[in-house]
Image (cartoon, rainbow, N blue to C red):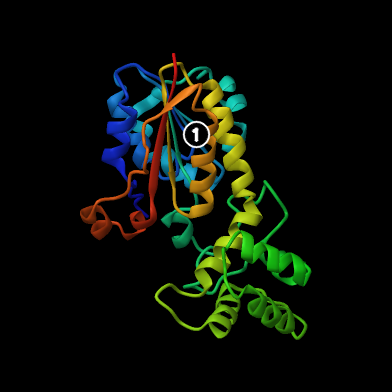
Amino acid sequence: MEHIPVLLNEILASLNPQPNEDVIDATVNGGGHAEALLSKIAPNGKLLGIDRDPAILAETRLRLARFGGRVMLAEANFANISLIAGEYGVLHPHCILFDLGFSSYHLASANRGFSFQKDEPLDMRYNPKDTDCTAEAIVNHCSPEELLRIFEEYGEIRRAKKFVELLVGERQKRRIQTTKELAALAEKSFGRGKIHPATKVFQALRIVVNRELEHVTTGLAGAFEILEPGGRLAVISFHSLEDRIVKNLFKEWKDAGTILTKKPITASHNEIRQNPRSRSAKLRIITKNS
């Protein structure tokens, strides 16, 4: 499946990569942003691309093969960005990009459990080698109190208590094993709306399974630490929980850096028409003071 990079023109304009600079794409995904960045930092600039998902990296490696030794791909967690950068010799990159959250690739991938449009096992792990925790384990084994906290805190779900009561009652009859089963419970509890009722339920579980918010905080801190003075850090977020972390960290760093986006950059109407996923994207940029 072709990866359509979100806010690509805005990323290139804000990061302003120059020939021969080194860049880190901390969430290389399908390689759309990386491909454009590599063209800008030619002829000798190098790009380190990081992703947790080995299936995505296999496809990205093919897409970026024409750049030869100028591209390095690491199957790793961006929470360890400073260690990864040291391992690959990209010690002080001029530009670092984070494109947070999951991708259209995850939705399209079979048997990963990210989509409620298909009937799949409730997995939701970006990389099975990272953790044994799955969404199925959470919905079937967590206490009602813990489930309520998960859905309220990470899904920002109102009336989550009613859904948890329904979920717990159902799992006492049978184990909840598939995405369709869980989505049906969400629809029964919340009813149909503009956004499918399972959207926030799946978001909450995905965040917990992959420890996404914890890793965002750690990864961004590590990225700002290794950033070349005068370099730029750009972060695309897709929901308020991620954006809040980015906004608060940038405020913490205001003495060591300059925030270039008083308000986040969002997608144009034209981009939203072409790529609906970009509708919720918010881009924030900070530069590290020299």
Left of 247 or right of it: where is 15? left
Q: Please name the residue shown 60% across and 48% down the image.
A: 212
Left of 144 or right of it: where is 78? left
* Nearer to me, 67 or 14: 14
Q: Quadrant location of the N terminus?
A: bottom left
Picture coordinates of residue 165, whole percent (x, y): 70, 80
* Nearer to me, 87 or 235: 235
Reading the image, the residue beneath label 1 is: 250
Outermost residue on the top side: it is 290
Q: Please name the residue shown 31% across and 44% down the image.
A: 7
Q: Please name the residue shown 26% across and 39% down the image.
A: 9
Q: Which amino acid type is marked by label 1?
A: Phe
* Residue 181, image quadrant: bottom right
Query: What SS does tag 1 mark?
Result: helix
The answer to whether residue 6 is above or below residue 90 is below
- The reply to whether residue 243 is visible in this rendering is yes
* Residue 44, image quadrant: top left
